[in-house]
Amino acid sequence: QVQLVESGGGLVQAGGSLRLSCAASGRTFSTYAVGWFRQAPGKERELVAHINSGLSTYYADSVKGRFTISRDNVKNPVYLQMNSLKPEDTAVYYCAAKVGSWYSRRPDDYEYWGQGTQVTVSS
């Protein structure tokens, strides 16, 4: 079993910053690929950022240059640093993990999910 718990969400003004944290259990977690997804009301869940065991990263065009994904393979946490936040970034953000290092933006390919944390950006 791999268990994920997100934290760090909240209310922030446009232009501000937040850092989301994904606390993970499991001694093999460092071998998993991890994605941060977000889902706004009425919209499909979308991949925001991805990192694999070799620390290769992917970012959606909408957040590239503003968000940074990182991980600590010894202590397990995965982070999403969000800078220059915009109202359109408002969503529930989820941490998800899958076996293997191959890239995927499909939620169904991810085996483990956290409960989500709300991020609200005011204008």
Image (spheres, rainbow, N blue to C red):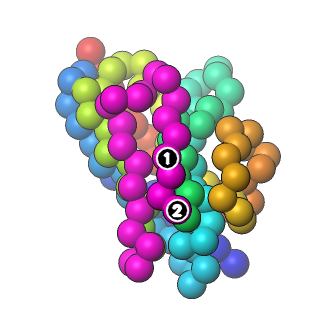
**Residue 31 locus on image (x, y percent):** 60, 71
Q: Is residue 58 above or below residue 21?
A: above
Q: Split into 4 quadrants, where in the image is the C terminus?
A: top left
What residue is shown at x 57% (from left), y 41% (from top)? 37
Identify the amino acid type marked 1. Answer: Thr
Q: Split into 4 quadrants, where in the image is the N terminus?
A: bottom right
Identify the amino acid type marked 2. Answer: Gly
Q: Is residue 116 above or below residue 22?
A: above
Q: Categorize mark 2 by other alpha carbons within 10 Å: few (<14), some (14-19), many (20+).
A: few
Where residue 122 sits, quadrant-wise, is: top left
The outermost residue toward the top is: 123
Residue 54 is labelled as 2
Where residue 30 sits, quadrant-wise, is: bottom right
What residue is shown at x 26% (from left), y 34% (from top)? 83
The answer to which of 50 and 102 lies nearer the viewer is 102
Identify the magenta region.
54-75
What residue is shown at x 41% (from left), y 62% (from top)? 71
Spatial CA span between label 2 and label 1: 9 Å
Our reading of the magenta stretch's main secondary structure is loop
The answer to which of 100 and 111 lies nearer the viewer is 100
Residue 57 is labelled as 1
Q: Tell me, yes or no, if residue 11 can be seen here.
A: no
Q: Is residue 69 magenta?
A: yes
- Secondary element under disc 2, as helix, strand or loop, is loop
Q: Is residue 26 magenta?
A: no
**Residue 104 locus on image (x, y percent):** 70, 43
Q: Categorize mark 1 by other alpha carbons within 10 Å: few (<14), some (14-19), many (20+).
A: some
Q: Tell me, yes or no, if residue 21 can be seen here.
A: yes
